[in-house]
Each structure stands twice: as C-alpha cells, then as structure tokens.
Image (tube, rainbow, N blue to C red):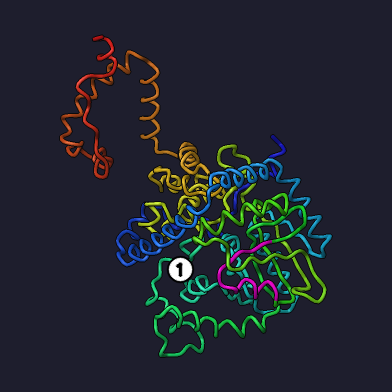
C-alpha cells in the first residue's frame, strides 16, 4: 500500500485557490435556477457540444476499446505514479529543463512568482489552465506586482468580466455573445466603440488586443494535458492557436502540472489524442497539438521550468475507490450530459472543477467535510459514466463520498435504526406491514407533515403494495 503514496496524503490548504465555495451547492443552485438567461445559455451550448461529440464518436468503430485502453493506461499510472514522476523529472532535466516539486497551492504559487520575478518581467501570458485556476495563481501573481494575461478567448472573457470559469472546456459558457460584447466594450483597452456581437467581430477584437501582448511578453505560464515520462515531453491541446503562441514566442516557459497528468510512454498519446477531442469538442482531432521537450537552442523558449503539483492529489490517491477521479483528462464530457449541470451551471459548485467530475474531485482534494454538499449534486443517472472517455465510474464514487460526508445526528440515528431493523427479520416484517400506513399521507405522500414534507416536495412516495413479498411467498 505504501507504493500508492507520493507523500503524506494532506488535502489542499484552505484560503488559497478555488476549490471551495462560499456556500453549499443547494443554496448556490437555487440562485442559478432562478436565472432564465443562464439556463438558456447553458442549454444551447451543452446541447450543441453533445450533438457534435456524438456524431464524431459514432464514426469510430473501436470507441469502446479506446475507452478501455485509456482507462487501463490511467490505472497503470496510478499504480506506479511515484516511479513515473521520478522518470519524468530525469527526462525533463536531461533535456535542459528544471523540475520543481510543489506540495500544495501555496508552494506552487511561491515557486512560480519567484521564477517570474527572477526574469525581471512584470507581465506573463497564460495558456488556458485549470490547475493554475485551482491554485489561484493569477491572484498570487497580481499580489506580487505581476500582471497575468489570459490568452484563451473564453478565459479572456472571464478575466475581463471579473468573473469565474463555469466550465472545464468553455469557461465562459454561461455568457452569450451580447454579454461578451458588453464586457469587451467595458474592459478591453482600445476596443472599437462600434463593436458588434457577431462572433467574427468579437474574435477579431480579442486578436487585436492580444497580438502585441504575445510579441512583447518574455514569460509564459501554461498547464499540460499530458507529460510523457519516457521522453520528458509535455503536450498541450487547444483550438485557437493562442497556446502555440505562448509556448513558442516567450524566452521563459513555466508549466504547472498536476502530478496525475503523467503517462508512461510516447505511444500512450495515440490513445488519448483520439479520445480527448471527440469527447470534449466534438472534433476528430485538436486544431493545435503542441509538444515540447526541455530546451532547444535557438528554437522556442530558452528556459523551461516544470512545476509538479500535489495539492491534495496524494489524499485522492490514498483512497482505492476515489482515486479513479485522478484518471480525468479534463474533456468535460460529463458536464455536457449532466442534467444537474445543464440547469445550474458551474458557479454553483463553488470550485474551478464543476459538474460530475468536480463533485467527486473537489471534495477529495479539500477533504469531504469542506465540500460536503457536492457529492449530492447529482441524480446518479449514470450519464456521466457513459460519456466518460476513460470510464471513470463517477456514480459509484459519489455514493462512496456520500458515506464519507458528515451527516446530521437525526439522519445518522434514522439510518442506524433502519440498519438495525433490516438486520432483524421479525422487526423487518413488522416494518413492512407498518409501511401500509403511508396511505394516510395522501396520494404520493403529499400529506406528510414537516419535516418529512421536505422530502416529498420534490419526490413521489411510492404507493405500498397490497401484500409484501413475504406474504405472497407464504401464501404459496
């Protein structure tokens, strides 16, 4: 068992980063449900992505085998993660890079701000990165007098709007184009006052704003989709080309990567580069797939740093059930099929990781008590498992985490009484007979008094059968 631990399985520290919300999911969800524009935006966007994804997945005759291969590779990674990370460090170092190990968000932010400050730069350009959102790197850079500039269009919209991402793949999915136009007019320097809300015009405005920034900023910060332990190669996939600019133009490149992103061999990329685009954007391949190995004299960044981040991942790895969450390749397929996410959006989850994967990953990174409501942010319909390209059994993890979450004393007492009753046949038979009294609660339980009415307000109480199975069996 000690082979599964990278270190002491500590959770992500409070007060830094974006893994904990200010309120529980039910309260935040109620507010989101009251916003009809938000629901229209989400419904349109997730429906469009679902349709595109389904069409290109249907083209692949061996999709189930690809999913199984992806799941097997990820399970292998988790089984020997420490060895693979040491191998990755050696390969990156041999190629001219420098590897840093960060136990948590505080340490990662300190490392990155120190590296940027050492270059003398007061501005960095950023590739879209969930992990830098997780640790609150933008806030740490700003506090150190360094301006972070998001270059992904959706992340730029979120940054200029002083907003938060609400989707793993499309951070501004909760905004429509009219809202984006208003954000650009209000916050983008030098924007044309006559800007329209046509997508082409909005993209052109962002391009003009970013072009000079790309050419004049000497430091870039990125995440990584994959890191190949065999060669020390890092990979980023994206759709706009901004990532390619950030990964090639600056003199210094700093990559922050969760330790779970490592894969053993170059050939393993074959599997994931087929799974990821189809499951995420509904494309046959990513428009831009950028890979780099250390430093190449005269070509690309001449200084490369890789920050390997734990921030609670050892705690996730220590749970034989929950560690499946570390298999996630951040495709967002589970968000696009989830009926809960489609109605509440990502902000209700309070974490940079929303939707079904966030409901199982965030509580484990922070400790379940700090995100106790998230495992209940699901109908357990199983659509997320069906959509997941690496076959993460999210419903099973949700049930597992619900058992780990703190429960009110009354609920715990009720469950203990139920368990005792089910363990004693005579009591169980008597309880079955007593269940017929539920007819007194009216049709579908609508006549139950508080606090029981809180349960039946959104659920139907099944009508009890005319006879129990025991009675039916005894009569025969």
Residue 247 among those drawn in magenta? yes
Q: Which quarter of the figure has residue 29?
A: bottom left
Q: Is residue 12 above or below residue 38?
A: above
- Give the side of residue 269 with respect to residue 339, left or right: right
Q: How many labels were placed on the picture?
A: 1
- Give the side of residue 297 with respect to residue 213, left or right: right
Residue 216 percent location from the top left of the image: 67, 84
* Residue wearing tag 1: 172
Q: Residue at x 27, y 17 (%)?
A: 430
Q: Residues within 10 Å of mark 1 (few under 14, many from 20)?
A: many
Residue 69 percent location from the top left of the image: 61, 45
The answer to whether any part of residue 118 appears in the image is no
What quarter of the picture does the N terminus occupy? Answer: top right
Residue 316 percent location from the top left of the image: 60, 44
What quarter of the picture does the C terminus occupy? Answer: top left
Q: Residue at x 52, y 81 (%)?
A: 206
Q: Residue at x 23, y 21 (%)?
A: 434
Residue 404 percent location from the top left of the image: 49, 38
Q: Is residue 428 above or below residue 330?
A: above
Q: Nearer the viewer, residue 287 or 169?
A: 287
Q: Which quarter of the figure has residue 235?
A: bottom right
Name the secondary structure under disc 1. Answer: loop
Q: Residue at x 63, y 42 (%)?
A: 72
The answer to whether any part of residue 410 appears in the image is yes
Residue 24 among those drawn in magenta? no
Give the magenta range.
235-248
């Amino acid at each position: 068992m000690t082979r599964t631990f990278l270190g002491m399985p500590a959770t992500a520290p409070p007060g830094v980063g974006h893994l904990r919300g200010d309120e529980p999911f039910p309260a935040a969800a109620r507010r989101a449900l009251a916003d009809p524009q938000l629901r229209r935006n989400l419904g349109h966007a997730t429906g469009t992505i679902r349709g595109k994804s389904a069409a290109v997945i249907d083209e692949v005759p061996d999709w189930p085998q690809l999913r199984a291969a992806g799941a097997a590779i990820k399970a292998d990674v988790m089984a020997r993660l420490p060895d693979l990370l040491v191998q990755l460090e050696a390969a990156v170092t041999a190629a001219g890079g420098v590897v840093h190990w960060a136990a948590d968000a505080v340490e990662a932010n300190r490392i990155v701000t120190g590296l940027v400050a050492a270059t003398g730069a007061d501005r960095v350009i950023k590739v879209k990165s969930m992990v830098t959102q997780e640790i609150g790197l933008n806030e740490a850079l700003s506090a150190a007098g360094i301006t972070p500039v998001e270059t992904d269009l959706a992340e730029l919209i979120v940054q200029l709007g002083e907003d938060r991402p609400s989707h793993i793949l499309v951070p501004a999915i909760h905004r429509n184009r009219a809202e984006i136009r208003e954000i650009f007019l209000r916050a983008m320097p030098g924007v044309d006052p006559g800007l329209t809300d046509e997508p082409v015009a909005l993209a052109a405005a962002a391009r003009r704003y970013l072009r000079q920034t790309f050419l004049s900023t000497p430091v870039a910060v990125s995440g990584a989709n994959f890191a190949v332990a065999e060669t020390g190669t890092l990979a980023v996939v994206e759709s706009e080309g901004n990532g390619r600019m950030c990964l090639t133009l600056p003199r210094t490149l700093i990559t922050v990567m969760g330790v779970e992103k490592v894969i053993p061999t170059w050939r393993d990329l074959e599997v994931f580069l087929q799974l990821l685009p189809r499951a995420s954007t509904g494309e046959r391949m990513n428009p831009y797939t950028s890979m780099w190995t250390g430093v190449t004299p005269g070509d690309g960044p001449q200084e490369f740093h890789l920050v390997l981040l734990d921030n609670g991942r050892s705690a996730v790895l220590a749970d034989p059930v929950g560690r499946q969450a570390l298999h996630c390749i951040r495709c967002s397929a589970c968000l696009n099929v989830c009926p809960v996410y489609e109605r509440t959006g990502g902000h209700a989850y309070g974490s940079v990781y929303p939707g079904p994967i966030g409901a199982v990953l965030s509580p484990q990174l922070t400790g379940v008590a700090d995100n106790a409501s998230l495992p209940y942010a699901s109908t357990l319909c199983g659509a997320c498992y069906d959509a997941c390209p690496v076959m993460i059994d999210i419903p099973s993890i949700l049930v597992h985490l619900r058992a780990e979450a703190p429960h009110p004393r009354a609920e715990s007492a009720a469950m203990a009484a139920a368990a005792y009753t089910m363990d004693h046949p005579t009591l169980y038979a008597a309880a079955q007979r007593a269940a017929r009294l539920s007819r007194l609660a009216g049709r579908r339980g609508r006549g139950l008094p508080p606090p029981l009415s809180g349960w039946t307000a959104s659920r139907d109480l099944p009508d009890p059968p005319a006879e129990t199975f025991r009675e039916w069996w005894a009569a025969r």
